Image (tube, rainbow, N blue to C red):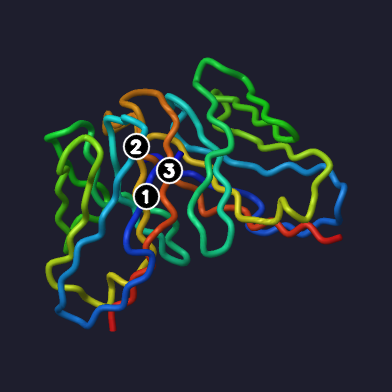
Amino acid sequence: NAGVTQTPKFQVLKTGQSMTLQCAQDMNHNSMYWYRQDPGMGLRLIYYSASEGTTDKGEVPNGYNVSRLNKREFSLRLESAAPSQTSVYFCASSKTGKSEAFFGQGTRLTVV
Amino acid sequence: KQEVTQIPAALSVPEGENLVLNCSFTDSAIYNLQWFRQDPGKGLTSLLLIQSSQREQTSGRLNASLDKSSGRSTLYIAASQPGDSATYLCAVPDAVSGGYNKLIFGAGTRLAVHP
């Protein structure tokens, strides 16, 4: 049971470069989420997708875009990376409604 | 706006102790509350999910309780072991925004269990 899989696990970018973080889940969940975790700030929601074909902004969406490619996959794109986007990024998924959320292992991103 | 607070921020105990981690939230209109464990450099592992209609949930040596009216949840760990050392996070859905699973997290309790 793979659960939620994120790639890559580690990445170093130069300021201004772009990249896409990939996330896939094999639990047939409808909802998917992207969070970032920063020391002293905890986990904060970037974007979420309540179901295939829909996306919406979370608490800290600036500088990011997302694509819900299909029911399994939800990607997060940084168009022009900034040092402030240095963080650990987590993808999560859940069934729609009052259900348990499952998280991936994270992507550690450093922007220099 | 919902806010989640966890006390204590850090805890160090000898092996074998029973311990309680606390989580409080400001808006009692929650659908559920979830407890997670995070090991250093790793992702979040779901431990327990308590629905708003439940008072407690148990999994092995873990027991989580929920008191919506007072805005509190506790995670009880029985007979602690060094392998329990991790950061424990609680989270509630942002019900005000209508998103069942847009989770709002506490800052976590960092637990160290020493032999």
Horizontal and vertical percent for residue B39? Answer: 58, 57
Query: Which residue is denoted by mark 1 in the rendering?
Result: A5
Disc 2 from disc 3: Cα separation: 7 Å
Q: As shown in the figure, which amino acid type bears the numbered disc 2?
A: Asp
Are the residues tagged 3 and 1 within 8 Å (C-beta)? Answer: yes
Chain hosting mark 3: A
Task: Say which element carries label 1.
Answer: strand
Are the residues tagged 2 and 3 within 8 Å (C-beta)? Answer: yes
Chain hosting mark 1: A
Label 1 crowd (10 A; few <14 / some 14-19 / many >=20): many
Give the residue drawn at x 22%, y 38%. Answer: A49
Are the residues tagged 2 and 1 within 8 Å (C-beta)? Answer: yes
- Count numbered badges in the picture: 3
Q: Is residue A112 above or below residue B32?
A: below
The numbered mark, 2 or 3, whose residue comes first in the sequence reads 3
Q: Is residue A57 above or below residue A86?
A: above
Q: Quadrant of residue A62?
A: bottom left
- The residue closer to the viewer here, B11 or B42, is B42
Horizontal and vertical percent for residue A5? Answer: 37, 50
Would you say A91 lies left or right of B24 here?
left
Disc 3 from disc 1: Cα separation: 7 Å
Disc 2 from disc 1: Cα separation: 9 Å
Horizontal and vertical percent for residue B63? Answer: 69, 31
Query: Which residue is denoted by mark 3 in the rendering?
Result: A2
- The residue closer to the viewer here, A85 or B29, is A85
Query: Which residue is denoted by mark 2 in the rendering?
Result: A26
Q: As shown in the figure, which amino acid type bears the numbered disc 3?
A: Ala
